[in-house]
Image (cartoon, coloured by chain):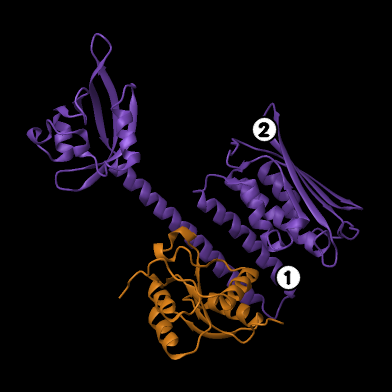
Chain colours: A orange, B purple
Amino acid sequence: MDNPLSGSRVLLVEDEIIVSWLLQDMLADLGYEVVGPAARVDQALAIIEAEDIDAVLLDLNLNGQMSYPVADALVARGIPFVFATGYAKNRLLDGYQTFPVLQKPFHRLEVGDVLAKLLTQEAPKPASLPSFQ
Amino acid sequence: MVFTDAKETGNPIIFANDSLLALTGYNREELLGQSINFLVEGGADPETRAQIDAVFGDRADTSAEICCRRKDGSTFWAAMFGNPVRDRTGEVVQHFASFVDTSKHRQAEDRLRFLLDELNHRTQNTLATVQAIALQTLRGHADKEVVAAFEGRILALSKAHSLLGRETWTAVGLRELLDQILLPFGLKNGGAARFSVEGPAVRLQPKAALTLAMVFHELATNAAKHGALSESTAGKIGISWLIEPTPKGERMQLRWQESGGPPVAPPGRKGLGSRLIEGGLAQELEGEVRFAYEPSGVVCQIVMPLPHVELDRSG
């Protein structure tokens, strides 16, 4: 795969193990190095703290817990990310409405496109950062 | 219900019945003499203002749904029905308005909306799991082509579900459906010039939308493999439709025409694609399909009834 962004480190945050395998395969096919997967908010936060990450694919709903605290931490560090969700985009919290979203189920072309955009553009900032402290 | 004085500014309340007192928590003395806006939440908002003015205007049998405020500060939605009261000369002297609490109805609607969102979310998640299970199961055991075909079909189904979910499962525009289904075939990604899509606005019922989503996906997949969208050709696909009345209601004639691709020949064996196209439409939509492998490219003509179709003005 002649992806110029090949080798970029992408953190996968997804609670359903079999879906995370699918994404790992897709990301590997695209030439990315997969970090994780993290299945819970605290796991994701720990990895972000400890490792160098270029972009994050972030499932919105982690076994009933919304992943906004992870999103907040990524915004604070300027790490670009895309939400993955089966919900319609308008269900995102107000401050995150303008952020990129991948609709489930995943289309490998869309996964490729959105990651390429994330890794070449500046990370978007939320209109007003929601607080989850 | 209330009567208000039309000759004073602000429509002061001159009569309030017991059920309005019970609904708002005020006693009669507290309400009499107050402007009707006293009961309205956000009365300064121009839209609410206009609604109140309409109910307390010159026209008979007006109505509006207004957010109202109780004495304890809590709010409720009420349907207000207004009528002017005229004196002998025809001049409006009072207004009569009744209030119906619609909060329960609103709550039920919100709850339904929430459940529908949940259902859509779960459907999409389940399809994502099906996709993942299939790919893990087939990994190493099946051709890449077979895996891609399966994945493409699941994704086409999911796009149709997602569009229907957005419209609370009522109907989907044919053009929106085509946009979604043709997206992975390059409709929006530089390949747009290879497609021409023309026809009047059509709203499809859920069953028709799901079936046509699969049919368009199969046609496009076939075009990508063997026809006008195959690599190293500059082929084009024209999709056009018209609606015509029949004694049994409206029907749609849709034409998918490929050109500029390599010469095509009928397949030796019928795969799921042609079964979906011919069988799916015939059985599920009482439609007819004519499939022709003309030298210039595949032509697929679909004729299907459009039950209860509404023309969507927004296109």
State which quadrant residue A7 falls in. bottom right
**Coordinates of residue A22 in the picture (x, y in percent):** 59, 76
What residue occupies the far front of the structure in this picture?
A: B9
Q: Residue at x 59, y 43 (%)?
A: B205
Q: Mark 1 or 2, which is nearer the eye?
A: 2
Q: Nearer the viewer, residue B203 or B198?
A: B198
| Structural crowding at the residue carrying mark 2, measured as other residues with C-alpha within 10 Å and reported as few (<14), some (14–19) or many (≥20) | some
* Location of mark 2 (residue): B250
Q: Is residue A119 above or below residue B40?
A: below
Q: Is residue B27 toward the left or the right of residue B209 in the image?
A: left
Confirm whether circles 1 and 2 share one chain.
yes
Residue B129 point in image, percent of width and height = 55, 69
Q: Where is residue B230 shown, x and y percent of the image?
A: 82, 64
Q: Are marks 1 and 2 in contact (CB under 8 Å)?
A: no
SS type, badge 1? helix
> What's the residue at 51%, 80% (across, down)?
A12
Left or right: where B78 falls relative to B310 = left
Pick whichever, B248 or A70, lies toward us.
Answer: A70
Please give the chain letter of the residue carrying mark 2.
B
Residue behind mark 1: B146
For the residue pair B156 and B73, the one nearer the viewer reads as: B73
Mark earlier in primary sequence (1, 2): 1
Q: Quadrant of the N terminus of chain B?
A: top left
**Where is the C terminus of chain B found, in terms of image quarters?**
top right
**Does residue A4 lie above or below B252 as drawn?**
below
Q: Is residue A92 visible?
A: yes
Q: Is residue B183 above or below residue A63?
A: above
Q: Amino acid at mark 1?
A: Val
